[in-house]
Image (cartoon, rainbow, N blue to C red):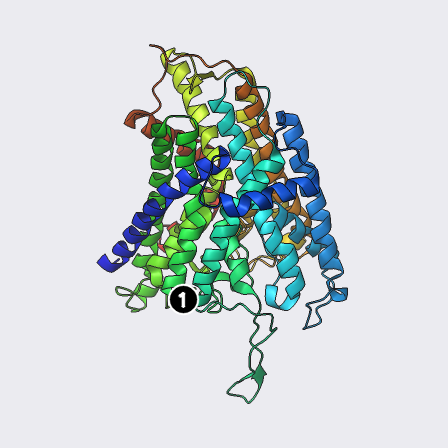
Amino acid sequence: MTLLGWLQILLFYGMLLALALPAGAYMARVYAGERTVLTPIMAPAERLLYRISGVRPELEMGWKTYAASILMFSLVSVAFLYLIQRVQNLLPLNPLAFGPVAPDLALNTAVSFVTNTNWQAYAGETTMSIFTQMTGFTVQNFVSAATGMAVLITLIRALARNQAGTVGNFWVDLTRSILYILLPLSILIAIALVAGGVVQTLAPSAAVVTLQDNGNQIIALGPAASQVAIKHLGTNGGGFFNANAAHPFENPSAVTNLILMLAETVIPVGLTFTFGRMVGDTRQGWVILAAMLSLMVGATILAYTAEAAGNPRLAALGVDQTMEGNMEGKEVRFGIPQSVLFATITTGTSSGAVNSMHDSFTPLGGLAPLVMMQLGEVAPGGAGSGLYGMLTFVLVAVFIAGLMVGRTPEYLGKKIEPFEMKMLALLILIMPIVVLGLTALALSQGSARSAISNPGPHGFSQVLYAYTSQGNNNGSAFGGLAANTLFYNLTGALAMFVGRFWLILPTLALAGSLAAKKKVPAGGGTLPTTTPLFLCWLIVVVLVVGALNFLPALALGPIIEHLIMVGVQ
């Protein structure tokens, strides 16, 4: 560990807070329907889209209609993206003449991008045509992120409203998320990336490179910058190139690396300020932000400490790691600080992009990104999904605290009653059931075990990480697992679909129930939720729930692998 490394980490967090505060205020104005700097440009386009699609923006929906709209829109999107992949050989912009994608891989990929997961069991530059990347994947990067943001806004409205029968209009929330937030920011980020050296061209390949053995290598190109911009901003993940953000054409320098890290965190963090403004109490947003950052900073410290310490097995062989630490699987242009920070951010959000190979991390270094996902990706989480996940823990924390001290469980004037607790229980239990159940199923199948590249605890971690990533709609890969098989493609698609929509539905049901409730004025029995004590309690609840769900599985993987590495028998 070096002072320069810590300064890089502190610089990132400082810049993030500086950008997130105005971004949060801006998003609050967008969702409140107030005038913004982009209104003169985007309002005519918004009205035109409503007119073409027949949407009446003044008509709001109940939670069931809102949920049905999301499900139907998403199912149509899955079918459309699946079709594009299956017939990409017949479509334009396929200069390398890629054939149709196999049915199981096409299904897995379609579900992956529609659910904001972007898990990739293929190499993009050798599998997908430019048309598929542009019209299929990039479009879904916008709409899947906007869907998550729309669901969050319904929950915020529910907490802010008093005895309301509606939660908003999905088509309006979706459109405004794209037109006013995701699209303009993506354009700015794409321009910055191109200026930094990220490729953006319709040319399929660069000049041929002559190798030492006189062979030739074709360097793949494509419209990468436009897709990279929204994949990070929308916390989608997935790389235009197989090496993802470790590829020099996708992430050439420390400057572009910083841009990508800020892009994938500014919306999830900024939404905490949006939440505070929309519910009329900015202190509520600050408490949630503090909890998110505490968890993310803790994971960063753990990963940096583990990777900077290096591998004691190598130290015993006389390899000096005091200056570099564990550089296996990391890019020299980023080093350990930016690699572990990127790994923590990409799994703390639902981005899943990587600039280093997590499979090469030390056991505790790999434990950090794994735990960030297993906590439910709430620190700070995906675009929209992270905050509604953290609000789930807030409501649970309020309920438990109320039972412990004999106070009425209520949050922002809304009582937390049996129906709300049933929905919260579903939100907490669905993800670990899916992840642990499919991990156990995979390890019981000989064909699935044969896809593991490393035996023992590390191989177990590869499978656990894969389903944790898919079940949490993250998309990052631990590496080393040959996942492009019928078993992993189908079970992975199931994990991604359930992990997305079986959490969205209880969230919308929760929003519908809370919106209909009468606001109760705060009294002597109301638990204060803006104090340092509640902040600490919220962090404890998040950690305890995560530990109860996954600690036994972690003990079989990274924890026992660490004990083996340090020589504990």
Depth order, front residue of 271/209: 271
Could you tell me which residue is drawn at 56 percent across and 62 percent down?
A: 240
Depth order, front residue of 6/559: 6
Could you tell me which residue is drawn at 39 percent across and 66 percent down?
A: 253
Horizontally, residue 311 falls left or right of residue 488, namely left
Q: Position of residue 23 (x, y in %)?
A: 40, 43
Horizontally, residue 204 falls left or right of residue 459, namely right
Looking at the image, is 257 positioned above or below residue 205?
above
Q: Quadrant of the N terminus?
A: bottom left
Question: Which of the 4 image quarters holds residue 144?
Answer: top right
Q: Is residue 146 visible?
A: no
Mark 1 lies on residue: 331
Looking at the image, is 207 positioned above or below residue 136?
below
How many marks do you count on the picture?
1
Furthest-bottom residue in this view: 214
Q: Position of residue 568 (x, y in %)?
A: 36, 50
Q: Amino acid at mark 1?
A: Glu
Q: Position of residue 112 (x, y in %)?
A: 62, 49
Looking at the image, is 125 positioned above or below residue 514?
below
